[in-house]
Image: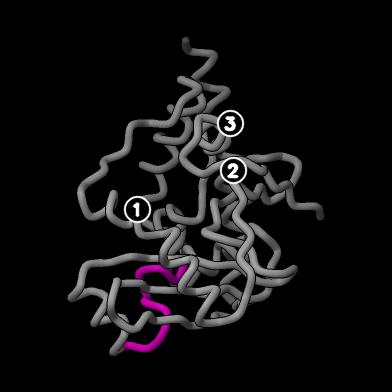
Amino acid sequence: MSRIIVECEQGSEEWMNTRIGVPGASCLDQIVNMKGERSTQRTKLLYKLAGERLLNRKEETYSNAAMQRGVELEPVARAVFEMETGLDVRQVGYVYYDERMDRGCSPDGLIGEESGLEIKCPSLPVHIEYLLGGKLPSAYYQQVQGSMYYTGRSEWWFMSFYPELKPLIVKVKANDAFILPLSAEMDLFCQELSELTDKLRAMQ
């Protein structure tokens, strides 16, 4: 299987277009829970993505000051990660799972041939919570494991960054016990999404 890497700047119009009607890593918790079982939010996401395909545009997403702050801090966090680990991070726009281009993710970086990076820049109390936990926060379990599923990589780095404080940097291994049921659920989800989109188009 050959992954398709789109070389573009994240946030650009080209990048936005790659994501229209595509279930990405950040929404996987709406498809499966941490056990790989179906989420109760699955149907709502199915309708949203089908709607995007009909309109051929991404639905406007809510953005607050905290989210904007994360966007602004990400380049700084990436530089700190490279300095702390000695690893080179390659920035890409989007990675599709395969030539169907019906699922994929926007990694915060790819590292070598087997790894990737997810960066979060949370508020001060949340960063402290993550530091004390010392591991991948459960809120991002599906996103990180899903990123490995989408990209075919065996490990992923997670970084929580807050300026002037020690960052949390942890390496996570791919969990086949989660990825195998995720893969099966994604096949079903993408098939249902395609069928629903066709049905809705016939109604227009």
Residue 190: give its label: 2
| Left or right relative to 91: residue 31 | left
Give yes or no for residue 141 being in the magenta stretch: yes
Across and down, in percent, residue 180 comes to 64, 68
Q: Earlier in the sequence, mark 1 or mark 3?
A: 1
Q: What residue sits 54% from the left and 69% below the top?
A: 145
Residue corresponding to mark 1: 72
- Spatial CA distance of label 1 from label 2 is 33 Å
Residue 112 left/right relative to 190 = right
* Disc 1 versus disc 2: nearer the observer: 1
Q: Amino acid at mark 1?
A: Glu
Work out whether residue 116 or residue 23 is closer to the camera in this orientation and state it.
Answer: 116
- x, y (%) of residue 84? 50, 82
Between the C-alphas of marks 3 and 2, the distance is 9 Å
- Above or below residue 148? Residue 20 is above
Which badge, 1 or 2, comes first in the chain's sequence? 1
How many badges with numbers are in the image?
Answer: 3
As rendered, which of 29 and 88 lies closer to the eye? 88
Q: Amino acid at mark 3?
A: Glu
Taking the spot 28% from the left edge, 89% from the top edge, the residue there is 132
Residue position marked by numbered label 3 in the rendering: 195
State the image quarter where residue 14 is shown.
Answer: top right
Q: Residue at x 46, y 20 (%)?
A: 55
Q: Nearer the viewer, residue 186 or 5?
A: 5
| Callout 2 amino acid | Cys
Residue 125 in percent (x, y) is at 18, 76
Point out the stretch of residues depicted in magenta. Answer: 133-142
Looking at the rendered image, the quarter that the N terminus falls into is: bottom right
Left/right of residue 104 with respect to residue 37 in the rendered view: right
Side of 128 where 8 appears, left or right: right
Question: SS at mark 3?
Answer: helix
